[in-house]
Amino acid sequence: QVQLVESGGGLVQPGGSLRLSCEASGSIFSINAMGWYRQAPGKERELVAAISSSGNTNYADSVKGRFTISRDNAKNTVYLQMNSLKPEDTAVYYCNLGSWHFGYYGMDYWGKGTRVTVSL
């Protein structure tokens, strides 16, 4: 059974930084792609960043240049470094297990989410 556990959310001021972590268990983490989604109040869940097993990445246009996704296969963990945070980055961030074929395809494996609030 796949389990994904996110951590690292919190309250940060605009322009600040946070690093989210997601630890995976119950899967062969090293061969799976991983993604970070977010869902803001009243909005649909959207893909923010994804990384393949070999380290290929893609990002939503809204976070390019500010967010960086990375992974540590030895720790079964994927990270999302978020810099220059804006109020519109406020959302619940979810970790997802997926596959990669010329891009990321999420599967129905989700963590419970970690809340990020960007506010003065």
Image: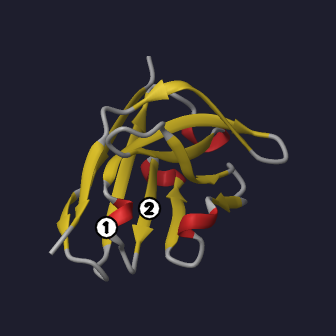
Q: Provide the secondary structure element on which disc 1 rests.
A: helix
Visual colour scheme:
secondary structure
The residue located at (27%, 46%) in the rendering is: 114
The type of residue carrying mark 2 is Leu
The residue located at (44%, 61%) in the rendering is: 80
Vertical comparison of 67 with 77: above or below = below
The residue located at (42%, 69%) in the rendering is: 81
Structural crowding at the residue carrying mark 2, measured as other residues with C-alpha within 10 Å and reported as few (<14), some (14–19) or many (≥20): many
Discs 1, 2 touching: Cβ within 8 Å:
no
Q: Residue 104: x, y in percent?
A: 70, 43
The quadrant in which residue 87 appears is bottom left
| Residues at marks 1 and 2, CA–CA distance in whole angstroms | 17 Å
Q: Residue furthest right?
A: 102
Vertical comparison of 92 with 107: above or below = below
Looking at the figure, which quarter contains the C terminus? bottom left
Q: In the rendered structure, which disc, 1 or 2, sits on the residue that comes first in sequence? A: 2
The quadrant in which residue 6 appears is top left
Q: Residue furthest front?
A: 42
Depth-wise, is mark 1 or mark 2 nearer the camera? Answer: 1
Residue wearing tag 1: 87
Residue 69 relative to residue 100: left or right: left
Looking at this view, is 65 or 119 the one in front?
A: 119
Residue wearing tag 2: 80
The type of residue carrying mark 1 is Pro
Give residue 38's mark.
none
The residue located at (32%, 42%) in the rendering is: 41
Q: Residue 50: x, y in percent?
A: 61, 52
